[in-house]
Amino acid sequence: MLRSRTSDTAGGATIEGDRSGFARLGALIIEGHGRLDLDQVGDPSPYARWLTGIVVRRGDAESVTVGYSDDRLDLTIGCPEPHVEAVAWNIAGCMLDAAVGYHRHEEAYPEHFYLDERAVPLVVERI
């Protein structure tokens, strides 16, 4: 299972999943291009709505971009080659053996030097 919720007002999003969902996401980030369809199970509250997919592309910018598709239905991740392993680990790999309920924040601040300062803030959670 892998799902993502967004708030239309606050601008942030979640990525929530089980071990197999995060394994699929990590593999997609390493591969560098493609789309994962997401589950839309339950009520998205306190967020406004579910996102339908995560699109990954190998970015040519210097930093990692996280945003939304033009129709705001998909979360998009643009990841330049030098940051692929860090992004795959920080968004997916560290969640593989995490306890259910464990979460982390993936947003632009000094320790996340690879993220573009305009990146959509993420909360990544093991469910």
Image (cartoon, grey):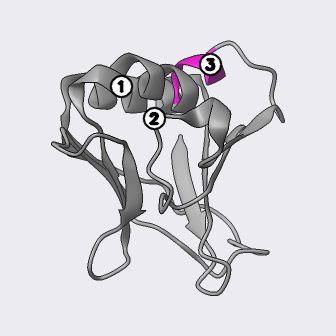
Please identify, in this view, whether the residue under mark 1 or under mark 3 is nearer the observer: 1
Quadrant in which the C terminus appears: top right
Residue 14 picture location, percent across and down? 63, 55
Count neighbours of disc 2 (C-alpha within 10 A) and say few if under 14, some if 14 to 19, many if 20 or more. many
Q: Three-letter amino acid code at disc 2?
A: Tyr
Cα gap from disc 2 to disc 3, whole angstroms: 17 Å
- 60 lies left or right of 52: left
Is residue 93 highlighted in magenta? yes
- Mark 1 / mark 3, whichever is N-terminal: 1
Q: CA distance from mark 2 to mark 1?
A: 7 Å
Q: Which residues are magenta?
A: 92-96
Query: Circle 1 is placed at which residue position?
Result: 83
**Image height of 42 relative to 124, above or below:** below
Is mark 2 in CB contact (under 8 Å) with mark 1?
yes
Query: x%, y% of residue 3?
Result: 54, 52
Q: Which residue appears farthest toward the bottom when viewing the image? A: 9
Residue sitting at the far top: 97
On the image, which quarter does residue 30 sit in? top left
Task: Report how far apart the C-alphas of labels 1 and 3 lie in the structure.
Answer: 15 Å
Q: Badge 1: how crowded within 10 Å, few (<14), some, or many (20+)?
A: some
Q: Which residue is mark 2?
A: 114
Residue 87 is situated, as x and y percent measured from the top left of the image, at 45, 29
Q: Residues within 10 Å of mark 3 (few under 14, many from 20)?
A: some
**Rendered residue at 65%/82% (across/down):** 48
Disc 1 secondary structure class? helix
Residue 94: mark in rendering: 3
